[in-house]
Amino acid sequence: MKIFKKLSLISSVFLLTFFGEIAVNIACGSEVDPYDYYISYFHNNVQGDEYTPFAFNQMAYLNSEEDVVSESEINSEEWGKYLDVKAQDVHKIMYNVDSATNVKLTNYKGEVSSLPDNLQKNTFIQALAQHKDALKYYSFAKSTEPFANVNFDMWDPKPRDTTAMDELAKVAVKLTESEKDNFLKLRYAYQAERMFHYAGLHTESKNVYDKFIKTNKTKSAVKGWALALYAGSTRRLGNPEESAFLFSKVFTTNPERRIQAYKNYYYNSAPVNGALKYAKTNDEKASIWAINGFGNLDFNIESLNKVYLYEPKSQLNGALLVREVNKLEQALIKDSDLAKISYQYYFYESDKGKYKDSVKTLNLKRLNEIKNFAVKLAAEQKYPQPELGTLTAAYLSWMENKDLDASNYLATLNPAKLPEKLRDQYRITDLLIKAKNIKKGNPFNENELLSSLKWLDEKRFAENKTVRNGQYDDWSNEDKRFTKTTRNFYQQILAPAYLKMGDTAKAALAMVKGDLSYNLMKNNSLFKNMSYQSTSFWQQYLSPKSMQALANYKTKAKGNDVIALLAKALNKLNNDEFYELWGTTYLRTHQYEKALIYFKKVSASYQYFSPADWYADDSEAKLVADPFIETVNDYPKKYASNDQRFNKVIFAREMARLQKLILTDKKNAASYYYRMANAVYQTGYYGNSWFLISYDWSTYANEEKPKYNYDVDYKLAKTAAVWYAKARALSTNPEFKAKCTFMLAKCAQKQIISNADYSAYNYYNTKSKAYKDFIAANYNNPYFKELKTKYAKTSFYRIAVNECSYLEDFIAGSKGKS
C-alpha cells in the first residue's frame, strides 16, 4: 500500500485540512499585543511618567513612540513668554492652521486687518504686528518650511533642493550676524544650521552651531534641537562615537526630543565605552548608561548600578529599576492555564524540566540582585522617592513566595504619606500578599478582599470612561495599567483558585468580571464583552451543574460581598447567550428535553450558528450539515444538499423524539439507537455537525489530548459507540449489524488517534516506530476481525472494503498470514 494512500486515511480521517471543512473557526486566540504579553502587577510608571516610553517591552523597540513632552507646546510657550501673549494662540498659528490659512500667513506683513476675523483676534498675530523684528523672523521661518518639512514618499522620492537650502542657510547666517536680540539670533542660527544640514553641508552646519548657538546665552529648547543636528552632522562626518555621546546629551536635556535622540544614539552603533570617552560629568556618564539600559532586553543590573553611582538622585534610577522588575515578571510569573495570554502562540516554551529549573534558578538569583539594589536605594535615601525601593523589595519578595518578608517591607511604609503612584502600587502589592492563600488553592475569606476589589474597579473604570459599543475591549493601550491589573487578578489568581476548590461557576464569574473594564456598555451581549480566553473558558468548561450555580449566583447581586460584586458584572449582560450555552451543556450530556427548556428561554430573534459549505459554487445547491447522515468515510466530509439547516433547537427536538421512541416503540429501537449514534458521531471533531456541541473547530485540535467533559463525544466518540453497540445487539439483520460493527470500528479508531503521539501520524515521520505502531494499531482494530468473520457475505462489507483502506489492508494482511 502506498504511503499516500495510507495518509489519506479514507476510512476515518484525522488529517483534516482547511480546504475540506465548512465554517472553520481557528481556536488560537487574538493576535499578540505588545503591551500585554506577560503577567504584570508592577506598573511601569510607578516611578513617574518621564521615562515611560522606555519601559520594558520585549516585543517593541520602544514602549511608546510619543515623547512625554510636546515640542510644539514648548516652542509656543517660549514665544508666548517672549512676546507676552497666550501660548495657545502661538500654537494655533504655528501648528494648527489649514493650508489656505497657511498661505495667507506666509505673506503676512503685519497688517492685521488683511487677515480673516478669526485670526485678527489672535494675540500672537497682534504681537507680531507690533514687534517688527519678530515678524521679520516669522516671515523668514515660513520661507524655510517647504524645505524643512518634506515628507518622504518611497514611491516618488523627490530629491531635496539643496541649492535653495544652501542659499537660505547663507541668508540666515547674515541675519544671525546682524540680529542683536539673543532670542531671535538663536533662532536665525538654528534655521541656518538646519538648512545646511538638510543640504548635506555638514561642516558648514557644525560651524554655525559652534560660532552662534553654542555661545548663545539664551535658555531655550532650541539649543537642544540644534545640538541634535550637530550630533547628526558629526555622524555624517565619520565620528559615530562622538555622535552617540552628543545624542545622549540631547536625551537628558530635551524630553521633547528624547525618543529621537534615543533612536539616533543606537543608529550610531557605538559601544558604550566609545560614547563614555567623551563624557566629562557624572550627569553625562549616567545618561549614556541609562540609554544602554533602556536598549537592553536582557537582565542588566550593570546599567542600574552605574546610573546610581553617577546620579543617585536621577529619576533614571527608578525607571531602570522598574524595567528590571518587569523583566523578572515576564520570566517568573507563570500565567494560568485558564487565561493564556496570546503571546504563547508565538513563543516556544521548553518542556525540558532540568533546563526550565536552571533558568528559574538563574532568574531567582537575578531577582535577589535587584531586590538588594532596591533595599540599598531605600536605605541610602539619595533617590528622591526611597519608598520605591521598599515597594520593589516587597513586590519581589511576593514574587519569590516570601510573603512574610513582603509584609514586613510594606509595614515600614505609611501609604497615606506616599505619592499617588506609589500608594496605588502599595495597595496592589498588599492585595497580592493577602491573596497568596487564594493562589495556593487554600480555603480563604474572599470578602477580606472586597474593599480592594472595589478600589480596583474605580481605578479601571476611570481609565475607560467612554461607553463602549459592545465589542470586547482591545488591551493594546499601554496606559490602561489598572485595567490589566484587575483583569490579571481575577483571571490569573481568583478564577484558578475557585476552580481548584471545585467551584467552576465562581471561576466563570471571575473570568467575566476581569474582562468588564467599562462601567457601562451599549451592547450587552455576553460573549461580545468577553475576551477570547474568557469566552473559551465558558464554552469549554461549564456543565449543566455549573450553569445552574451561575443562575443561583445571579440572584445574589444585591448583596455587599464578593459574590455580589461578581454577580453584578454578569447581570449587566443579556441572557440569550447564557441560556443558549446552558442548553448546549445539556446537548453535551444527551439530556435533550432539558436542552429544549433553556433554548425556549432564548429570544426568538436569536441567530443560532449553522454553517454552510464555504467552497460550494453559488450556482450550486449549498451543502449543509446534517447530523443524521450515514457515512462510510470521514473525509471528505459528507453533507446534505438541501435547504434543511440544522441548528441546536432542531437537533435537540429530534434527539428527544428518538429517545422517547426507544421506550415507546421497542420493536424499532435498534434503528432509533443507530440514528442517534450517527447524530452523536457527526457532532464530533470528525463529523459535519461539530458546531452542535462545540463552539470552534480547528485543525490544531487534533494534536491536543481530550481535556473537556464533552471530549468524550467530540474526540472519543464513546457515546456513539455505546449506542451503535446497543443498536447491533437489538437487531437480527446482518446488513444492519455489519454497518453497526463498521461504525464501532470507526469509534474505536478515535481512541487510537487520541492515544497516539501527534508525531505518529505526521507525514514527515513515516519511518519512525511511533508512526508504524500507529498504522499497525489501525490495521489491528478488533472490529475489523468481527467484520471479516461474521459479516463478510454482506453487501455492506463489500462496500466498506472498497472504500476503507485500513479494512482493505487488514483483509490483505490476513490473507498473507493464512
Image (cartoon, rainbow, N blue to C red):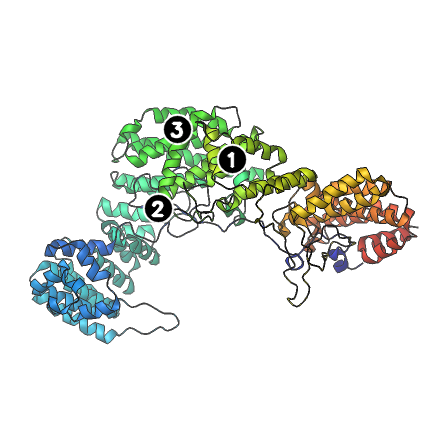
Kind of residue at disc 1: Leu
State the residue at coordinates (54%, 36%). Answer: 508
Return the residue at label 2.
293
Say whether residue 684 is visible: no
Say whether residue 628 is visible: yes
Kind of residue at disc 2: Gly
Kind of residue at disc 3: Ser
Does 620 sit left or right of 324 as displayed? Answer: right
Q: Give the mark toward the camera: 2 or 3.
A: 3
Res 311 quadrant in image:
top left
State the residue at coordinates (29%, 39%). Answer: 308
Q: Position of residue 41 (x, y in %)?
A: 41, 37
Return the residue at label 3.
451
Position of residue 606 relative to residue 502, above or below, is below
State the residue at coordinates (33%, 49%). Answer: 53
Does 493 sit left or right of 48 as displayed? Answer: right
Residue furthest to the front in view is 604
Q: N-terminal of the two: label 2 or label 3?
A: 2
Name the residue nearer the viewer: 602 or 761.
602
Would you call the spot at circle 3 few (<14 residues within 10 Å), some (14-19), or many (20 or more)?
few
Mark pair 2, 1: CA separation: 41 Å
> Label for residue 509?
1
